[in-house]
């Protein structure tokens, strides 16, 4: 299994990283991608990727933080090139639900992240909430640029997912698909191609059933894999191989 999106730099995981790694390995996790959300936090990402061979990282500014960061495309490229285990850009994108940053700042930041990912030929990890039209419109401008897209913690509509498939996007399922009130999302994943799917925890957030109410961690990804296998009516071992193959194809080919 591969946890395609988590935040190991957040507590309680960061202060207990050895235990987190040990439990992850015991659960059968072979890679963990820990995601950068602020420039200040990138130093912790760099320290984490050196903790163990299974940990990889990204560089990026979360849309909530966009108005507090005036980061250029070249700044992003420089940071991402600072360590060979930084294998993606993000998370970036648009969040018009909270609007912790104004829309103009979010859009400008998103474009800089996209263009940096294209120049580096690495995937961009996309956060999109209440911004389906705007997210798609921006991403579609780069359709001919070989943009590698991973829609993290995908909770969008089925229509949105169909449009994103035209951009060869990948979709990561989080613990949300295990929630009883997520029937629409489960139906969306039921109809997405297996070759476009990954799994994630987004830990320490969004602990899956039956761990809801606890701080999430990578080892809990088995519950999301189990639920996705049930949704797709596929053997769990086969889905594990497929999602692992998809991650390695996107990030390492």
Image (cartoon, helix red, strand yellow):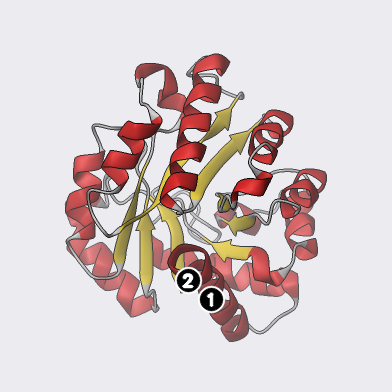
**Residue at 21% from the left image edge and 50% from the top image edge:** 46
* Residue 34 image offset from top left, x and y in percent: 35, 53
State whether residue 55 is above or below residue 104. Answer: below
- Identify the disc placed on residue 221: none
State whether residue 177 is above or below residue 21. Answer: above
Query: Which residue is under mark 2?
Result: 248
* Left or right: 174, with 91 as reference point: right
* Residue 253 image offset from top left, x and y in percent: 48, 69
Looking at the picture, tell me which residue is in the foreground, 222 or 101. 101
Say which element carries label 1. helix
Query: Which residue is under mark 1?
Result: 245
* Left or right: 4, with 86 as reference point: right
Does residue 128 show up?
yes
Count of residue discs: 2
* Left or right: 77, with 62 as reference point: left
State whether residue 131 is above or below residue 190. Answer: above
**Residue at 66% from the left image edge and 64% from the top image edge:** 196
**Residue at 63% from the left image edge and 41% from the top image edge:** 142
Is there CB contact under 8 Å for labels 2 and 1?
Answer: yes
Does residue 10 show up?
no
Which of the 4 quarters of the picture holds residue 39?
top left
Callout 2: 10 Å neighbours few (<14), some, many (20+)?
Answer: few
Label 2 vs label 1: CA separation?
Answer: 5 Å
**Residue at 46% from the left image edge and 74% from the top image edge:** 1
Callout 1: 10 Å neighbours few (<14), some, many (20+)?
Answer: some
* Residue 146 image offset from top left, x and y in percent: 59, 53
* Left or right: 231, with 4 as reference point: right
Looking at the picture, tell me which residue is in the foreground, 40 or 140. 140
Say which element carries label 2. helix
State whether residue 186 is above or below residue 163. Answer: below
* Residue 91 image offset from top left, x and y in percent: 45, 41
């Amino acid at each position: 299994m591969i946890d395609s999106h988590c935040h190991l730099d957040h507590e309680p995981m960061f202060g207990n990283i050895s235990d987190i790694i040990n439990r992850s390995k015991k659960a059968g996790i072979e890679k963990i991608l820990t995601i950068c959300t602020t420039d200040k936090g990138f130093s912790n990402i760099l320290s984490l990727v050196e903790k163990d061979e299974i940990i990889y990282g990204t560089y990026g500014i979360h849309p909530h933080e966009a108005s507090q960061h005036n980061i250029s495309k070249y700044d992003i490229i420089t940071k991402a090139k600072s360590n060979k285990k930084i294998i993606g850009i993000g998370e970036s994108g648009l969040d018009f639900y909270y609007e912790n940053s104004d829309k103009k700042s979010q859009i400008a930041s998103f474009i800089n992240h996209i263009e940096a990912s294209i120049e580096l030929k690495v995937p961009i990890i996309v956060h999109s909430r209440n911004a389906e039209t705007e997210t798609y419109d921006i991403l579609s401008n780069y359709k001919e640029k070989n943009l590698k897209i991973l829609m993290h913690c995908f909770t969008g509509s089925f229509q949105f997912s169909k449009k994103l498939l035209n951009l060869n996007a990948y979709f990561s399922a989080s613990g949300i698909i295990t929630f009883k009130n997520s029937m629409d999302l489960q139906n969306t994943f039921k109809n997405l191609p297996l070759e476009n799917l990954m799994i994630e925890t987004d830990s320490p957030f969004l602990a899956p059933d039956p761990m809801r109410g606890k701080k999430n961690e990578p080892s809990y990804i088995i519950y999301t894999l189990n639920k996705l296998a049930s949704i797709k009516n596929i053997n769990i071992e086969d889905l594990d191989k497929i999602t692992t193959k998809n991650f390695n194809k996107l990030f390492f080919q």
